[in-house]
Image (spheres, helix red, strand yellow):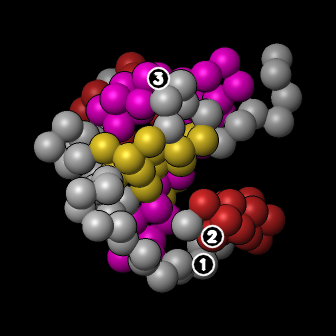
Amino acid sequence: MFVKTQLAILLLILTGCAVPMRSTKAPAHVYEILVSGEVRSPNGFPSSRVNSVYSAIVEAGGFTPRARRDRVFIFKNGGRILVVDATRIMKDQKLDLPVSSGDEVHVPKRIWLW
């Protein structure tokens, strides 16, 4: 799934359009919502503990210093890809988006560190 995620992000960045991915949902006992990329503790979390983009990032220990906070990817279980600005969500939690079982929240790395 990680390689597919990286390829989908690359295609989205280069072409500006999302390519639907086939869902490869893991068994519920492994994880339900995956948080990957530039977070302190990337891992899978049960949906009982994670129900939004903000709570997923918090549950994963928050951002690393290299995180690109303004362009967080949400790979929905149905194949849709959403891009959100987590800095705006942190300021106004009314903008937070729900996540559900089988979704992945991916925080990419900043290209430049200033």
Q: What kind of secondary structure does the magenta stretch mostly adopt? A: loop
**Is residue 69 rendered to the left or right of residue 16?**
left
Which label was assigned to residue 101? Answer: none
| Mark toward the start of the polypeptide (1 vs 3) | 1
**Is residue 17 rendered to the left or right of residue 55?**
right
Which label was assigned to residue 62? Answer: 3
Please tell me which residue is depicted at 43% across the width and 75% down the height of the picture: 24
Please tell me which residue is depicted at 82% across the width and 22% down the height of the picture: 113
Q: Which type of secondary structure does the marked residue at label 1 adopt? A: loop
Q: Which type of secondary structure does the marked residue at label 3 adopt? A: loop
| Residue 5 placement (x, y as % from top left) | 60, 63
Residue 54 makes an appearance in the image: no
Q: Which residues are magenta?
A: 55-81
Q: Could you give the CA–CA distance between mark 2 and mark 1, rounded to whole angstroms?
A: 11 Å
Q: At label 2, which amino acid type do we have?
A: Lys
Residue 92 makes an appearance in the image: yes
For residue 113, above or below residue 21: above
Nearer the observer: mark 1 or 3; the answer is 3
Q: Residues within 10 Å of mark 3 (few under 14, many from 20)?
A: some
Residue under label 2? 4
Q: At label 3, which amino acid type do we have?
A: Gly
Nearer the observer: mark 2 or 1; the answer is 2
Q: Could you give the CA–CA distance between mark 1 and mark 3, rounded to whole angstroms?
A: 28 Å
Q: Residues within 10 Å of mark 1 (few under 14, many from 20)?
A: some
Residue under label 1? 19
